[in-house]
Amino acid sequence: MKGTTVLRLVQSLSPSEKRQFKMATKKQQQSKAYVSLFDLIDRSDATDWKQLKTAFKKRYPHSSIESCADYLFQSITEVLIQNKIKQDPSFKLMYGLMKVDLFRQRNLGEQAITEISNLLPAADDIQKFALKYILKREQLNIFSETNFEGISEKTLITEQQAARELLKDLRNAQEHHSLYEILKLRLTHATPANAATKKMILDDLVLSELAIVNNKTKHHLESQQLHLLFQSFYFTRIGDYQSALKTFYILNNLFEKHLLRLSHPPMDYYATLDGILDSLRMIGSYPEMPYFIEKLHLLDRPAYPDYFRYLVKKTALLYELNFYVVQRDWKAAVHKINATPQSSYKDFPMVHDKKQAELLFYTALCYFYTKNFKKAIRFLNEVLLKKTINYSLPYYRVCRLFNIVLHYELKDLEYLDYEIRSYKRYFSGKNVLLPVEKYLFKIVALRPFLNPKYKNQQLWQQLEPLRAAISKTAAEADLLNYFDFMDWAAGKFLRISAV
C-alpha cells in the first residue's frame, strides 16, 4: 500500500471517528506500533510520507512502517464500515446480505428467509435494485435448496417474475449509464468546438437515450436522474444554455424530493450541484449561481460525516469567491474570507485536492485584487509548499504561475529568477512550456517597471508574435480561465493597471 493512502485516510477522519478507533485499539493486546503511526499522522501537518517515515523509524527502529500502515488502514476501515452500517441504508443492506449468506452456509434456511423478508422493503424504499435482485435470487436459491417446502408453483412463478422485472430495471439503468458515460467522453475529449458538428456526432446517443426514456420500463429515481444528467450535460456542451438551465432546476428538485432515499451522505447530490455550478461558471450564467450555492449550504447538516460537511463548505466558499471575482466585488470577497472560520481552510485539506487548491487560489486572487500581495502569497503557499504536487495539472500549474505574478508585484527579482529557472527545470522533458508561460517569463525578464514609457511601447510591439501564439490550445485556455495573464501583462507595459 502507498503510504499516502493511509495518510489521506487518517486525515479524513472526524474527531468522533478518531475516538472510535482509539477505543477499538484498547481491546487489542498486540504491539501498538500502528497506533503510534496513527498518532504521528494525526498530530502532524505533514503531507510528505518520507518525512513521516523518518520520524516513525526513530521511534520504532525494528518495526516495518509498511506493515504498520497496512494494519492501520485495515483497522480504520473496519471502524468506518461499522459506522456506515449504522447510518447508511445501503450498507445495512449489504451487511444483511452477508448474514443471509452466512445463514445459508450454516443450514439456517428459515432464518435466512426471515432476514431477506426484512431487507426487501428497505431495498425497495431506497431503490437499490441490484441489491434487491441479489436478495430475490438468494430467496429463490433457498426455496430450491429446501425442495420448495411450503411453496406453491404460483408463488414460485410470482417470485421469479419479480426477479425478471428487477433485471429489466437493471438493464435499463446500465444502458442509460453507458450512454451518459460515452456522451461525457466524446464531449470532454474527442469533439471539435463547433456546436453544429457536436450535435451531428451526438445524434446516435441522443436517439438511443430517447428510446430508453420512451420505452415501457418504469422510470425509477436512478433512471430519472440519469436522463436529466444526460440532458444537462448535452445542452451545456452544445450551447443550448436556456434548456440547460431549465434542466438544472428540474434535476435539483428531483434530488431534493428524494433526499431521504439518497446515500448517507448524499454524494450524488453534492456531485450534481458541483457539476451544475461548474457548468454555470463555464457558460457565464453567474446570476444563477447563488441559488445553487444555497442548495449546497443546505447539505451542511449535523447528521452527515464531518469530512462531507467540510467538502460542502469548501465547495460553497469556492463558488462564492468565484462569483465575487466575476462581479469584481473585492470588498464583499474579502469580507467573506474574513468571516470564514480558519477551519474551513485547514480541516480535511486532503478530502479533495483540487477543491482545496482552487479554494486557496481564489482566496489569494481576492487579496491580489485588493493589493494585499503578502497575504495572497501566504494562502498560495499552502498549495505550493506541498512536496507531493503534480504541477502539470491546470489548477496547480496556475498557482505556480500566479505566484510569479505576486512576487513580481513585490519586485522580488532575486526570487523571480530562481523560481522561473526552477519552473523550467520541472517541465523540461515532461511538458513543453506553453506560449503563455514563455510570454509571462519574458515579461518578468524585461522588467518593464524599470523602463521608460517609450521603451515599453517598443517592447510591446516586439512581443506581438508571441502574443499571437497564445490561446491556441485547451491547456492555455484552462490557465487563462483562472487568471487573465494577458490583461495583467498589458497593464505592466502600457501603464494600465490590471487591478
Image (cartoon, rainbow, N blue to C red):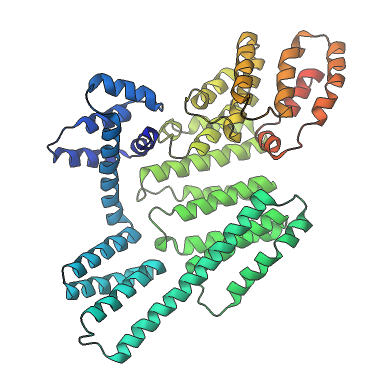
Give me the residue at 70% from left, 29% from top. 434
Residue 217: percent from the left, percent from the top? 52, 78
Q: How many marks?
A: 0
Q: Quadrant of the N terminus?
A: top left
Residue name at image x 66 percent, y 37 percent: 478
Is residue 171 toward the left or the right of residue 158 in the image?
A: right
Q: 317 or 349: which is nearer to us?
A: 349
Q: Residue furthest front?
A: 429
The quadrant of the picture occupied by the C terminus is: top right
Q: Position of residue 236 (x, y in %)?
A: 67, 55
Q: Is residue 334 left or right of residue 432?
A: left
Which is nearer the eye, 148 or 271? 148
Residue 38 visible? The answer is yes
**Residue 334 falls in which quadrant of the image?**
top right
- In the displayed structure, 110 sits above or below 49; it is below
> Is residue 490 toward the left or the right of residue 258 in the image?
right
User: Looking at the image, which is closer to me, 45 or 139?
Assistant: 139
User: In the rendered view, would you say 78 is above or below 375?
Assistant: below
Residue in the picture at 27% in, 37% down = 72
- Does the rendering let one see residue 366? no
Q: Quadrant of residue 105?
A: bottom left
Q: Quadrant of residue 486?
A: top right
**Residue 210 position within the rendered picture, expressed as x and y whole percent measured from the top left:** 63, 71
Residue 338 locus on image (x, y percent): 50, 29
| Residue at screen point 64% across, 30% down | 431
**Vertically, is 205 above or below 168?**
above
